[in-house]
Image (cartoon, rainbow, N blue to C red):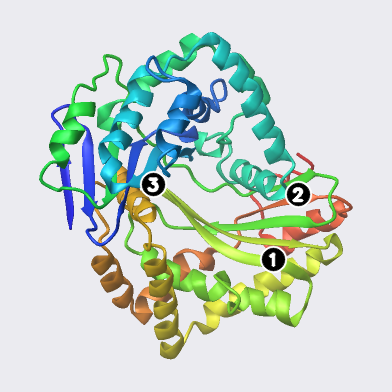
Amino acid sequence: MYNIFKLKNGLRVVVEDIDYVNSVSVGLWVENGSRNENEKNNGISHFIEHMLFKGTIKRTSKELAESIEDIGGQLNAFTSKEATCYYVKILDSYLELAVEVLSDMLFNSKFAVEDIEKEKGVVIEEINMSEDSPEDVLIDLQCKATWGEDSLSLPILGTTDTVKSFTQKDIKEYVESHYIPENSVISISGKFDMNSIEKLINKYFGHWESNNKKVTTYSNPEIINNVFYKKKSIEQLHLSLSFEGIKLGDDNIYSLLIINNILGGGASSILFQKIREEMGICYSIYSYISTYKNVGLINIYAGLNPNYAAEAIKVIKAEVEAYIKRGITEEKLSKAKEQVKGSYILGLESTSSRMFSNGKSVLFLNRVNEPKMVLEKINAVKMENIIEIMAKTFGKGILNATFVGDNVDFEVLTKLSQTDIIAYKNPTKLNI
């Protein structure tokens, strides 16, 4: 059973009562991430996420963790391009404690100067760890190649220089202006009393107000044609090829999920079977969808020996073109629907996953995507929908490419960027 209501201060609340479980997940969602930043304060959203765990006027950092972990619960958070989420998963009998702890973190965090300076070192090490991961480096590089100067290109973690620059004043002012009830959602899924939940949320979040409100707005960036390469001393070459996708909230996403699943969604997909199983030139290859407000993207990722780069890209391009040309059969469409539905249903097997799904949906779309509705929309996808969305996405061809690795022939990459990938409007940029 779902319910959505709004407090007088504008805070939206979505609750889902699941009476056959003994746990409850509570999430505080704020519509704020790296897309809301600029080059000077890049990373501040993620840094604030860290700081809310550093202690309040009521609890030390250790006491915050113990308040939940000592009774077997989990307390965590994450920051994305467009949102930050703080969440607790706990036994249903401790629901009020979960709500109180999240409110304590939000309203009573100290942001002590000493803690800020210490946490800078922690976050910088997180950035260093990310730099040691070629997949993470590739994602940030791909965002820069795709979105250029738009804030959507900014890395979630920020940079060492921006993190070092944050002051207590910067952090407090940012929280005051961006952490506002109008930009936020409380999402609760699990076992609880539906009759008393609104009173409970009002008790801890009803007084939430801000005098310096900055309601989130979004740009409409276009995908830029680029080839970026970053030299890194590693054995494999990691590559990403980008295609136009679908924006968040567009119902055509269900057609695209089916198309993507067939192309690169698993071990039975076209790309996996061709590039790995038949040719044996890579270990990992897959495609994935990214949806944002006003814009979307599809990426094909592969990690392989640099010597196979040219061959792999030619085959990937040929397979995508052949896929669009021949389309799919009704039998394949039916099987793909079952795969997508099965994956979706399995993803809802925990209270936390349902809390995440409901919270994100209400935060960005002001609605709940109920499982029954989602399954109906997947079932409703017809062949003409597949053909239309193929043309609008993969049919436009590879729009940009990014590479991370070593021992790569620059002339080969340059040639690929001009022939086998796309005829670029902008000059090819290499060795970023």
Q: Residue at x 30, y 51 (%)?
A: 358
Q: Amino acid at mark 2?
A: Val
Residue at the disc numbered 3: 294
From the image, which quarter does the N terminus lie in? bottom left
Foreground of the two, 144 or 172: 172
Residue at the disc numbered 2: 404
The image quarter in which residue 276 lies:
bottom right
Is residue 84 among the parts visible in the rendering? no
Tag nearer the camera, 3 or 1: 1
Mark nearer the N terminus (3 vs 2): 3
Whether residues under marks 1 and 2 lie with C-beta atoms below 8 angstroms apart, the answer is: no
256 left or right of 130 in image: left
Q: What secondary structure is marked by label 1?
A: strand
Foreground of the two, 77 or 177: 77
Q: Residue at x 25, y 54 (%)?
A: 368
Foreground of the two, 377 or 227: 377
The location of residue 406, given as percent across then percent down, is 85, 50
349 left or right of 310 in image: left
The location of residue 52, given as percent across then percent down, is 45, 25
Q: What secondary structure is marked by label 3?
A: loop
Tell me the CA gap for discs 3 and 2.
28 Å
Crowdedness of circle 2 by 10 Å Cα count: few (<14), some, many (20+)?
Answer: many
430 left or right of 8 in image: right
Q: Amino acid at mark 1?
A: Ser
The image quarter in which residue 397 lies:
bottom right
